[in-house]
Image (tube, rainbow, N blue to C red):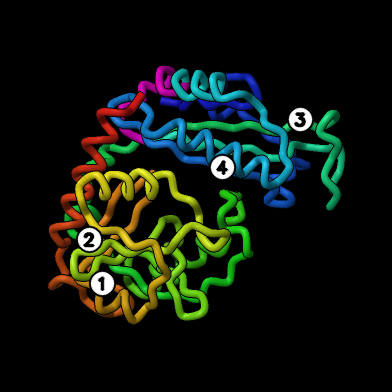
Amino acid sequence: MTRTVYLNGAYLPETEAKVSIFDRGFLMADGVYEVTSVLGGKLVDFAGHARRLRRSLDALDMPHPVDEAELLAIHRELVRRNALGDGLIYLQVTRGAPEDRDFLFPDPEKTPPTLVLFTQAKASLTETAAARDGIRVIAIDDIRWARRDIKTVQLLYPSMGKMMAMAAGVDDAWMVEDGKVTEGTSSNAYIIKDGRIITRALSNDILHGITRAAVLRFAAEAQMQVEERSFTLEEARAADEAFITSASTFVTPVVEIDGAVLGGGTPGPLVRRLRQIYIDESRAAAI
């Protein structure tokens, strides 16, 4: 079945949706994006994703194409038109398509932003091999730009990192800067030591994960200890447990870091508990 996508006010078959070759997302990576999970046809933490989208747009002085109410209506209509049960909705906003290529931003009065949304069906987001068995990661240098807190479409190096991981025969990579782990290629990174969940504090160095915020809130409510601080690769290799979070992976265990096996190579009890809490709470709060 051909998907129905959204493009600048219209719902179209994916084969008919076209964007100009002069769009700045294509020419300059001048755009931002969000990915919202869908469980049972309902949106997980939509308000959080909408808030971060506003933050990203404001940080880049980019016009807001629609308000939050209309954005919610678009998400729900895409779920309906595509009969989406479990899956993802990808959203991208660019600075639009001026008449020609230029480094200077176009006049927003003459060049409206481009807004694109599409769905991705997933057989199951809650029961995956990665969640059951855990994933293995390698360390790579973090050479990205300094505003990683803005969720831009500049994803070349994270893509390269995933290819490095695949070439090494593992699942993903954790990026390291000045000896400290920043985050995964498309996720926030955590270790657990002596019952304490440790993850890097919010700053321009990492993405302010929506799933991260929810997981840390649920952990605190469950009386788990949380430390928001930087940690070294050596600390990570010596951890009792580790995990990643993202909108598409929820809470996923990490069982090997740069060759060091954690917890005998199987997901640990705290990560398994936290994943179940997150899924239960997300299902209950989805809209």
Percent position (x, y) of residue 74?
52, 21
Residue in view at x 48 percent, y 57 percent:
202
Q: What element carries label 1?
A: strand
The amino acid type of the residue labelled 4 equals: Tyr
Q: What residue type is labelled 2?
A: Gly
Q: Give the labeled residue for mark 4.
A: 33
Please identify the quarter of the rendering in which residue 241 is found: bottom left
Q: Which of marks 1 and 4 is nearer the N terminus?
A: 4
Q: Mark 1 points at which residue?
A: 256
Q: Residues within 10 Å of mark 1 (few under 14, many from 20)?
A: many
- Which region shows up in magenta? 78-87
- Look at the numbered discs 2 and 1 and tell me whether their residues touch, using CB distance below 8 Å: yes
Mark 3 or mark 2, earlier in chain: 3
> Can residue 254 be seen in this snapshot?
no
Q: Is mark 2 on a helix, strand or loop?
A: loop
- Residue at (43% x, 36% y) in the render: 36
Real-space CA distance between mark 3 and mark 4, rounded to the nearest whole angstrom? 17 Å
Relative image position of residue 57 (x, y in whole percent): 65, 40
Please name the amino acid that badge 3 sits on. Pro
